[in-house]
Image (tube, rainbow, N blue to C red):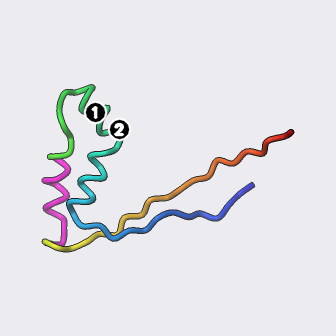
Amino acid sequence: MDHPAFGLELDWPFEQVIGYVSSWSATVQYRKALGQDPVPLLRESLGKAWPGAGATARVRIPLGLRVARLHA
């Protein structure tokens, strides 16, 4: 059965975006596999495009559902 799309929309400052990306399991695995941290490169490139100190960006995090029906 289909459901309407939904998720979170948040206005985050630069440091919160960087912190969120730093916490991803993919980021952790990258660090383990390659022995280097990709976050400083993201910080540098995203920082150049960020609108300025104190500015926020709209972050959209889609959420999905996995629903099951249990039969007695």
Mark 1 belongs to which amino acid? Tyr
Q: Which residue is drawn at 53% across and 56% down?
A: 63
> In x, y percent, where is residue 30?
28, 33
Report whether 57 appears left or right of 70: left
- Prevailing secondary structure of the magenta residues: helix
> Does dot 2 land on a helix, a strand or a loop?
helix
Query: Quick check: is 31 in the magenta stretch?
Result: no
Report whether 28 appears left or right of 45: right
Q: Give the range drawn in magenta.
A: 41-52
Q: Quadrant for residue 47, please give it.
A: bottom left
> In x, y percent, where is residue 69?
78, 45
* Residue at image mark 1: 30
Which quadrant is home to the N terminus? bottom right
Report whether 8 appears left or right of 46: right
Q: Tell me whether the residue at label 2 lies in contact with that at label 1, contact meaning CB atoms closer than 8 angstroms.
A: yes
Q: Residues within 10 Å of mark 1 (few under 14, many from 20)?
A: some
> In x, y percent, where is residue 59?
37, 64
Q: In this view, does 32 lie above or below 9?
A: above
Which quadrant is home to the C terminus? top right
Q: Nearer the viewer, residue 5 or 10?
A: 10
Q: Quadrant for residue 16, please give it.
A: bottom left
* Residue at image mark 2: 26
